[in-house]
Image (cartoon, rainbow, N blue to C red):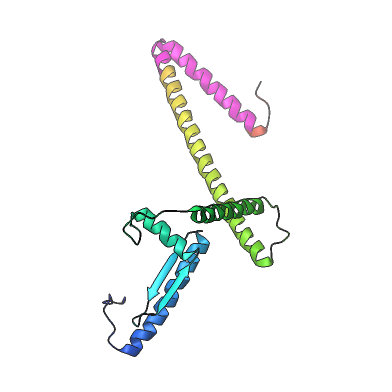
Amino acid sequence: MGRGKVELKRIENPTSRQVTFSKRRSGLLKKALELSILCDAEVSLMIFSPTGKLFQFASHDMDRTITKYRREVGLSGPNGQQPTFGLEFWRREIEELNTTIDKMETRLRHFSGEDISTLGMKDLKQLERQLRTGVDRIRSKKRRILSEHINLLKGKQRALQEENARLQKRELNGLTLAQRSLVMQLVLFISRRWLCSTTIGLPVA
């Protein structure tokens, strides 16, 4: 039997509550770090314990992230005014963008097999996995396109065969009974001749 749904409620035992807080806090901080690394996201996290102790994580400058957050949600500054952004803020913004661009260009060079002399074994293995995943996706896409192309050709072939049969039927309907018999005998003769030649490997003359 599967486990039943656990009701989330405050842990009454202080010791158990502290142990759970420590475990969940560590897991949350780890997830924030992984998210910032894997997705190149700007992540900031603040946790206050029941006793008021602060735990925090910031992939970038915490103050900078908070300032960006206040700007995005339209929060006013400490004196009730909209926050202003000076030269220092924009300088850091430009530095962050340049760093991100440099990282992306470096990754592109690595994917092309360039500038890999400084990579260690761990980085090389990770790059190999990424390239293998990319190749698998390309092959899957090629197979899908090829399958669609084959199905399209088969559809055209069926349409041509149906049109050819329709034309033949119309032409036969315009012939006399003797002419139809002659055509059918000719088709049968050619078919047998072709079957015989392909069986013994002789060219059809």
Q: Nearer the viewer, residue 114 or 42?
A: 42
| Residue 123 covered by magenta stretch | no
Q: Is residue 37 above or below residue 157?
A: below
Q: Is residue 173 magenta?
A: yes
Residue 121 falls in image quadrant: bottom right
* Residue that appears at 35% across and 89% down: 15
Q: Nearer the viewer, residue 2 or 73?
A: 73
114 versus 118 height, above or below: above
Seen in the picture, residue 184 relative to 124 is either above or below; the reply is above
Magenta: main secondary structure equals helix
Residue 152, percent across and down?
47, 34
Left or right of residue 60, residue 107 in this image: right
Residue 169 placement, left or right of 153: left
Please name the residue shown 33% across and 81% down the image: 50
| Identity of the residue drawn at 51% across and 53% down | 87
Q: Is residue 197 left or right of residue 25?
A: right
In which quadrant of the rendered image does the C terminus lie?
Answer: top right
Name the outermost residue toward the right. 117
Q: Nearer the viewer, residue 39 or 88?
A: 88
Q: Which residues are magenta?
A: 169-198
Image quarter for residue 189? top right
Q: Going by the picture, which residue comes out furthest to the front?
A: 79
Front in this rendered view, residue 130 or 25: 25
Residue drawn at (45%, 11%), measured in percent from left and top?
179
Q: Whole-percent x and y of residue 68?
A: 42, 57
How many dots with numbers? 0
**Horizontal and vertical percent position of residue 1:** 31, 77
